[in-house]
Image (tube, rainbow, N blue to C red):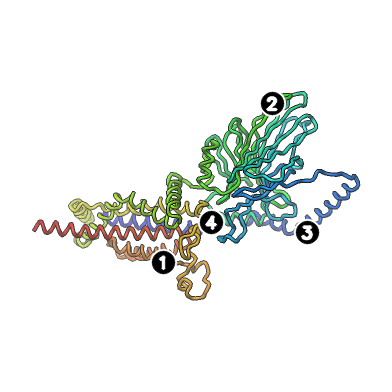
Amino acid sequence: MEQENNTKNLLLALVLSIVILTLWQFLYTIPEEERYKSEMEAYQKQQQLITQKKEKAAQQAQQLAQELQVTEVPEKRISISTPTLHGSLTTKGARIDSLTLSHYHVENDPASDPVTLLAPNNDKNTNEFYLAEFGWVSKDKALNLPNHNTVWQTSQTQLTPSTPVDLTWQNGQGLTFTLTVSVDENYMFAVTKSVTNQAGHSVTLSDYGTINRSWTPEHLQAHQERANYIIHTGGIGVFDGILQEFTYQDMSEQKSISFKHTTGWLGFSDKYWLTALIPSSTNTFFANYKYYFHNLRHRYQTDYSSSPYVVANNDTYQTTTHFFAGAKKISLLDNYAQELNIDLFDRAVDFGWLYFITKPMLIMLKFFYDWIGNFGFAILLLTVLIKALLFPLAHKSYVSMHQMKMFTPQLQEIRERYKDDKMQMHQHTMALYKREKINPASGCLPILLQIPVFFALYKVLFVTIEMRHAPFFGWITDLSAQDPTSIFNLFGLIPWEVGPVLQIGVWPVLMGLTMYLQQKMNPEPADPIQAKVFKLLPFFFTLILYRFPAGLVIYWAWNNTLTVLQQWYITKTYKKRTASSASSQS
């Protein structure tokens, strides 16, 4: 009876796993269309009107400038060039507003365009802008401070790791503001803000940093449809040692989210990319996440302002803010966290609630990759390591399962003999288990142990930049994407393009076959209906997992293969031991 209950529990667990995996695969966090319907209609109807207004405003501004004969200080662009970044900052507003990532491309093709991270706020651009800005604020309304229209002065034309840029501006009231921008060879900028006071009296200021990004309604909807609940995208920050995450929907619903007198960092997180402000650790700050709808664009902002400080007359006060803009490589994030004392900076990578498994798994994969030079083979080596670590528990489980298989006829006989007396059936079944030292529950252990490993590896493959466009061999050119082949065109032998629904590739088929072989080596459930359901599981799992990342399917197939070899070895050893025991008794 207990074996039947255990079998039913195992069947229930497997069915629930199938349901969970199916929901995971096919259910995504899709934005509510009604939320943007009116905005989309307004956007489409008013484009022509907005264009006309802009043209008219430009003509009026040009005419006014001609009449007044005003000569404005021209805006300059200072190029940014590092081994990993290319772009520019503008002297108008002192904005870092143009960055591309040299080592990453939009498509899995080195000839495709590099990934664009930051883009300027150009009124003619109907897509998105994404930029960072730095400056000062004060409660003294009479104080003239630089703003987004201020054109800063500099004689430099290029920002590189070896050549920082100095931007200066005088407010005409005795204050000289200086921004010194430097950048390392990766993705970290340092913005040193200094104020020299020769106003004849002290002034009270707060420095600030802000990140702004904008989406038109259709671009926001497309972005959110590409994301799902597996990974966080949107506002992110760590305040007083606690990770905080806000989706774009959270921000649009709450309009403003604030943290006062805090320490830490704040920014925006995409799947693979991050922008983050890291204020000076010597002073607390006020952090904000804001949303507003303007010019038919969804605008999101995260900013901080430092606690107020006093700049005495004939004195200079300076502070440094760091600004990260780049790929979320875990080794870089860990190095920056240590060098700059940034709390939980590695949590910018969405490792999830299995962080304690997921991050070590990524570190081991990176270790194997550095040794062998291929993430696919690194996954195979990691699987061997996991099997070795779990070998004692798995070995005991497989031995018990083999014993169950050996004594299946006796168990069936007990069921037939006592089918009308459940108590007697249970007693005799337990007596057989005790006599033969069989633990019927241990057969569930390998499955239970694999569940957290499976989900952790899925996270690693899905969210880490290290896995993006990482090849294995042959047709697997991206371990984070599904197997591109299909059984329905004989894996490319027939010149027929199959749709995504029919794209069941080589590795999913191999995974299903190895699962079938593994199942054949396990004891079959006594219940005929349960036995038939179990036989269909390899087929079900193939249909469920074929759209998962190829690296995960490769892991599962390889893990099944190792399990089959392990079970074959245990079966062979157990038979020899049984034969030897019978021979010695005779």
Q: Is residue 298 visible?
A: no
Q: Closer to the N terminus: mark 1 or mark 2?
A: 2
Task: Provide residue 384's location: percent of width, then percent of height.
Answer: 36, 54
Q: Residue 509: give its label.
A: 1
Q: Closer to the N terminus: mark 1 or mark 4?
A: 4
Q: Residue at x 29, y 52 (%)?
A: 442
In-front residue for pair 520/266? 266
Q: Is residue 185 visible?
A: yes
Q: Amino acid at mark 2?
A: Val
Q: Closer to the N terminus: mark 3 or mark 4?
A: 4
In-front residue for pair 550/287? 550
Tell me the distance, in whole angstroms, between the alpha carbons under discs 3 and 1. Answer: 53 Å
In-front residue for pair 165/200? 165
Q: Quadrant of residue 39?
A: bottom right
Mark 4 or 2: the one toward you = 2
Task: Provide residue 504's location: percent of width, then percent of height.
Answer: 46, 67
Which residue was labeled with disc 2?
A: 310
354 with respect to 211 (left or right)? left
Tell me the distance, in whole angstroms, between the alpha carbons under discs 1 and 2. Answer: 69 Å
Which residue was labeled with disc 4?
A: 28
